[in-house]
Image: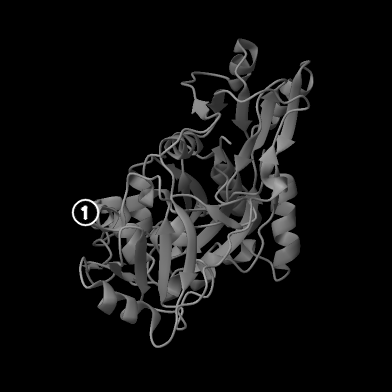
Amino acid sequence: MSPRPRLALLLGGGVLAAACAHGPGAPPAPETPPSPSSTCVVASDSAGAGRDVTAAFDDSADARRVARATRVVAPVRLDCEGRPSPGLAIRWSRDSSARFWTIDLDSPSTWTAGPLAAAWWADPDANSALRWAGVESLIPLDERRLVLGFSSPEAEPPTVLADRSLGVPPTSPRRNSVLPQPISGDLRDAIDRGVDLVHTSDPGVIEYASRRPGLTSIPLPWNRAYLLLLPSPSAGIGAAIPPDTAAFRAALARDAVRADARAAAAPSWWERAGACPQVAPPPARRRQLANTVVYRASDRVARDLAERLVALAGAPELAARGLDDEAFPSALASGSERSFVLAAPVHATVPCRESAGWPRSATVIPLIETRPHAILRRGTPPFEVEWDGTLVGR
């Protein structure tokens, strides 16, 4: 079942489209995009000249995001503080209703507005991102201006414009790119092999690097939240959550996990998940629900949290159980277990897409946030950290 009506792609009628986009009167002046914050630039103690950076990651999802960011540029870039800067679009502005946003494409780009809109409409990932973000129409005004019509007002530049599913190959290459390397085994071996950058949240690897000359360890922004989802009132787990939730979260961050962690900040995008369009849930398995705290088996932080929650609950019948990467999303969507511990991005460019696989009316309890560290070799060129924690070359 589609979360939104099918996107309308309007390819003609420039005057009519402009009138629809801006309403009566002159269109507003384009907003001037600020430059990325210098706090989002990461460099070693002796940064070298621009070149490609070899990198090793302890999380394959982080590595995939970096690889994609190397290949494509989204319409807008968001730095680690959420400040927008030009990507494929050189400027953007909204009409008086804030429901229509116009992006002006970079003139050297090989993409013009009509083909870009058609490509987004045809690409499943881009189409899905736009629909989950509430985009109802794409209106090319001319070769360089494209209007996105939203179902509700967007007071700030819509974060979907920074989603890489809307990205296209850059016109000019960056001076340096972060290039994930295949790894096997311990990341300490990658340090010994001389990679430029190791991206990790493993305290053992960070401590190992601190004893090696020529390396700098830099904490990156908090990029991952861990949530407890209760599809329905859960017998056995309630006792693990005390009334003082702030102290409880701080204790989990301090004592329960082997990662750089802090209590989860609130509120965040998941507070509004109930307002997202709903999709039909998969058929629930007809069986007695077990008293389990379920987590993705490949996520060691989620496992640590699940085991601590079981210990705190003090219920002999309650157990922590890991599911593989294929079984976990299916169980989560169907709400077939008592409770789930899962990771979610701290910042989401398309929030409703992130919560689309959650059971309806689930109770969401934020637990902790974690952040990785960048271990840099002396002479590594500087790079930037974007809003979702992805590392990009400059």
Give the residue furthest to the top: 193
Quadrant in which residue 190 is drawn: top right
Disc 1 marks which amino acid?
Ala
Pick whichever, 325 or 221, lies toward us.
221
SS state under label 1: helix
Residue 235: give x, y in percent of width and height: 50, 66
Pick whichever, 313 or 155, lies toward us.
155
Residue beneath disc 1: 122
Does 57 sit above or below residue 385? above
Horizontal arrangement in the rendering, residue 144 relative to residue 312 (left or right): left
Does 239 sit above or below residue 153? above
Residue 157: give x, y in percent of width and height: 51, 66
Quadrant in which residue 139 is drawn: bottom left
Question: What scheme was used to colour the molecule?
Answer: one colour
Horizontal arrangement in the rendering, residue 2 relative to residue 387 (left or right): left
Q: Does the image show residue 291?
A: no
Residue 98: give x, y in percent of width and height: 46, 78
On-image quarter of the N terminus: bottom left
Horizontal arrangement in the rendering, residue 169 relative to residue 375 (left or right): left
For image coordinates 55% across by 62% down, the residue present is 237
**Mark 1 closeness class: few <14, some 14–19, many ≥20 residues within 10 Å:** few
Pick whichever, 309 or 270, lies toward us.
270
Residue 302: give x, y in percent of width and height: 55, 46
For image coordinates 55% across by 25% down, the residue present is 56
Does 292 sit above or below residue 365? above
Q: Does the image show residue 192?
A: yes
For image coordinates 60% across by 51% down, the residue present is 79
